[in-house]
Image: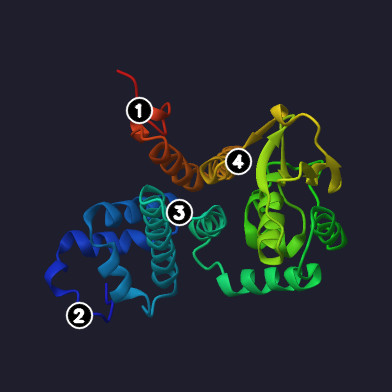
Amino acid sequence: MKNGHPTLNKHSDNSISALLTLLQDEDDKVASLAMEQFLNSGLAEETVAQFQEASEPQLRQRIHQLSGILARRRARREFLDAVAANRLSGWEGLIQINVIYDPQTDRGWIADAMREIVNAAGRGATAARVAAVMRDKEFMVPDEDTLDVDLYLLDAVLDCKDGSAAVLCAIAQQIGRETGWDSTISLFEGRFVLIDAHGMLVDPTEGWHVSRLQDKSKIHPCSSRDLWLNVLTQLFLASLVDGNLRDLHLFSEILAALNGTPLDDALPYPLGRAQA
């Protein structure tokens, strides 16, 4: 095979040439196996660098796919390292999860979309004001398709307005931080809500209804980790329902790592180790 890239010299043996040939196979399963071999060999980064502008369209496409897998792995590693070092806010963690799912996530677009809502809310916002802005912008929790991946990704929610209660609470909380209203994401009667120091409760599932909570014992404050685990678990379930094995494995690894458990021990086969 003429690849036109002679600089891969020190690894240009028969096995590498064979893998490059398999990478161009019309059968996606064969190409996936070749990608796995490249990833396991430690040569994936070098292969991507050498062949990302290959003249053969099929090879170039598969190399770009391999590049996307590497980008996801880097994003996953950065997320887990930041969590372990306790240097990640709840909001930044959601952005990182978005990047893990889609390495092409435009952080600048997310910032611009948020700035627009902040400007609409104005300074000195209250629970009622933030709820009104979220309602006016038509953010809502859908009644159907609750395992749609887009409900758990910040950029998709900011674009389409439909989102899970957890993500919508995170958006409203961030808007509040920017406009002078402090709140805590909490669980109330099995739903994600926001509650402030004055006992005002904002419920996105109930059309951003605002009420005064009388019994604070019914509220269970959520940490940043709780928020991430909810979103990651839903992405895991969405991948399971969609039959997307690559995403399923990705989110399985992250959930297992956050739980401090090796993936082989955390989940049953085929995600985990086969039982003897």
Q: Residue type at mark 3?
A: Asp
Against 64, is 267 above or below? Answer: above
Residue bearing mark 4: 234
Residue bearing mark 3: 28
Question: Quarter of the image holding residue 146?
Answer: top right
Q: Is residue 172 left or right of residue 101?
A: right
Q: Are marks 1 and 4 in contact (CB under 8 Å)?
A: no
Q: Are marks 1 and 3 in contact (CB under 8 Å)?
A: no
- Looking at the rendered image, the quarter that the N terminus falls into is bottom left
- The nearer-to-camera label among 2 and 4 is 4
**Which residue is rendered at x = 65% and y = 59% of the image?**
174
Q: Are marks 3 and 2 in contact (CB under 8 Å)?
A: no
**Residue 36 badge:** none
Q: Between disc 2 and disc 1, whose residue precedes?
A: 2
**Residue 6 badge:** 2
Residue 141: percent from the left, percent from the top? 78, 47
**Residue 265 badge:** 1
- The nearer-to-camera label among 2 and 1 is 1
Q: CA distance from mark 2 to mark 4?
A: 45 Å
Q: Residues within 10 Å of mark 2 (few under 14, many from 20)?
A: few
- Looking at the rendered image, the quarter that the C terminus falls into is top left
Q: Secondary structure at mark 4?
A: helix
Q: Residue furthest top?
A: 276
- The nearer-to-camera label among 1 and 3 is 1
Q: Is residue 135 left or right of residue 75?
A: right
